Image: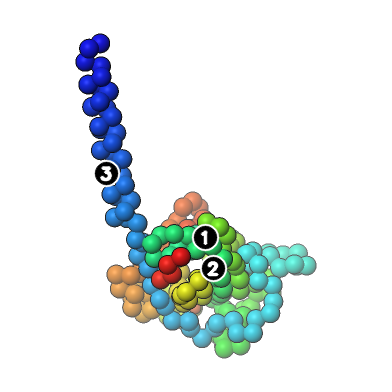
Amino acid sequence: MTDQPQTISRRAFAGYALLVGALAATRALGAPTLTAESPMGPFYPTGYAGEDDFDLTLLKGHRARALGDVIEVSGRVLDRLGNPVRGAKIELWQANAAGRYAHRNDRSAGPLDPNFQGVARLVTGASGEWRIRTIRPNFYGPRTRHIHFDVSGRAHRLMAQMYFPEDADRNATDALYRDLGSDAATSLARLEAPATYRWDIVLMDKV
Ligand SMILES: [Fe+2]
């Protein structure tokens, strides 16, 4: 029994050392990498006044869902220190399952889908969280699959594109993806579960 206090003391010291180590690691990891900027592209939904809620697969009054694989994408908007950005505005737009945008500048042959919303506008909650239900966009022309994001925080606005991790071969042939260089990892969503993706967006903002 006499050596118990020493044992406890050693344990306490070990616990303290772990805590200090964990704090140092948190600090080192505390500054996330900024999400890479990407061009807006020719299909920004200028003047779009249609439905713009989080579910792009279902339009009010329509009986059928959009064509294509339904996927969920969620994430957080963070500032450059890793703090959540509450109230960030997100506008996103994408091609449909035939690789076609519902935009007059898109003259490609793929059919429009009258049941696909194509655009969503979101505002992040207290933890910077956002979420959409959509369909997996298709490739078009030289482009790999992607979703366009226009994100406005408190002091910074970011134009970005999100890519899919399963498309590594096709991504490698996409000029805009390749232009990102080593920053491409910041534009790649993470597959969390079948048809479920996670993508955090890190802005220059300091909240
Ligand atoms: Fe695009």
Give the residue at the far right of this rendering. 61
Which percent across, then down, holds residue 31? 34, 61
Q: Amino acid at mark 1?
A: Gly
Give SS at disc 3: helix
- Residue 181 lies left or right of residue 91; in this view the side is left
Q: Is residue 46 left or right of residue 33?
A: right
Contact check, label 3 and label 2, Cβ < 8 Å: no
Give percent across and percent down for residue 88.
54, 68
N-terminal of the pair, mark 3 or mark 2, is: 3
Extreme-top residue of the structure? 1
Alpha carbons under labels 1 and 3: distance apart: 27 Å
- Which-is-in-front pick, marks 1 and 3? 3
First of labels 2, 1 by sequence position:
2
What is the crowding at mark 3: few (fewer than 14 residues within 10 Å), some, or many (at least 20)? few
Q: Please report the residue visible at 21 percent of the width from the left and 15 percent of the height from the top.
A: 3
Q: For mark 1, does the 10 Å Cα neighbourhood hold few (<14), some (14 to 19), or many (20 or more) residues?
A: many
Residue at image mark 3: 21
Q: Amino acid at mark 3?
A: Gly
- Please state the horizontal and vertical placement of residue 18, each as a whole percent of the image: 28, 38
Q: How is the image coloured?
A: rainbow
Q: CA distance from mark 3 to mark 2?
A: 33 Å
Q: Is mark 1 within 8 Å of ligand 1?
A: no
Residue 114 x %, y %? 69, 74
Q: Mark 1 or mark 3: which comes first in sequence?
A: 3
